[in-house]
Image (spheres, rainbow, N blue to C red):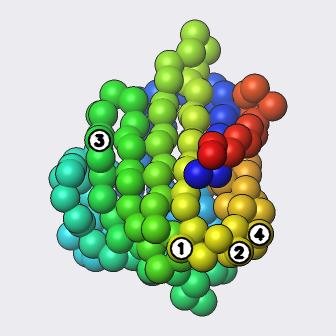
Amino acid sequence: MPTLTFSSDLPVPAEEILATLTMEGVNAELSPLVRMTAPVDFAGRSILLWPQKQFLFKSWILLFGFMPIDRHSFYFEAINPDSGFCERSTSITNECWRHERKILPLPNGSRVVDTVEYESRVPLLDVILKPLYKLVFWRRHQNLRSMYGGSASNSGVRQTSSP
């Protein structure tokens, strides 16, 4: 599965970043490229309080906030209120989508690390999806650094592919 990793060092404590893990916070990070929908029961609630190890809901992925481009089925493998989450979901586009967010304390702030692994349902789609995912997460980390200050860590992006 292709793997992308994005990392940012932010001059704020991990608790401050963890407090923004709501759908509103996620959409602020994803803006303006995409927006995700959520049912009212989940929209205002911290992701850190969502149930684990069960299907939660389906979310439309909206390009530029209005054009549906995918339908994502949310499932959280693990949620750690002190350091982030691991989501393993499916979508119309992907047989498997795994997004792990780690928020690690640093002496002068925190490091946010997003690792994404995915398996496209149609392998040729990867030619389009990989650059799109890279752009979305690059922008997501640009937004984080704009909100809090900080810089990309470890050159910000790493790509690996596993057989």
* Contact check, label 1 and label 3, Cβ < 8 Å: no
Q: Secondary structure at mark 3?
A: strand
Q: Nearer the viewer, mark 4 or mark 3?
A: 4
Above or below, comparing residue 80 to residue 147 in the picture: above
Residue 1 visible to an observer of this rendering: yes
- Disc 2 packing (10 Å; few <14; some 14–19; many ≥20): few
**Mark 1 vs mark 3: which is more N-terminal?**
3
- Tell me what residue is drawn at x 66 percent, y 35 percent: 7
* Contact check, label 1 and label 2, Cβ < 8 Å: no
Q: Which residue is mark 3?
A: 78
Q: How far apart in space, not on screen, are marks 2 and 3 (Cα)?
A: 31 Å
Left or right of 73 in this view: 133: right
Task: State the mark number for residue 127.
Answer: 4
Q: Secondary structure at mark 1?
A: loop
Q: Nearer the viewer, residue 47 or 122?
A: 122
- Tell me what residue is drawn at x 75 percent, y 26 percent: 154
- Tell me where residue 148 appears, x and y as whole percent: 64, 38
Q: Which residue is mark 1?
A: 121
Residue 149 visible to an observer of this rendering: no
Q: How far apart in space, not on screen, are marks 1 and 3 (Cα)?
A: 24 Å
- Tell me where residue 65 appears, x and y as whole percent: 59, 80
Q: Nearer the viewer, mark 1 or mark 3?
A: 1
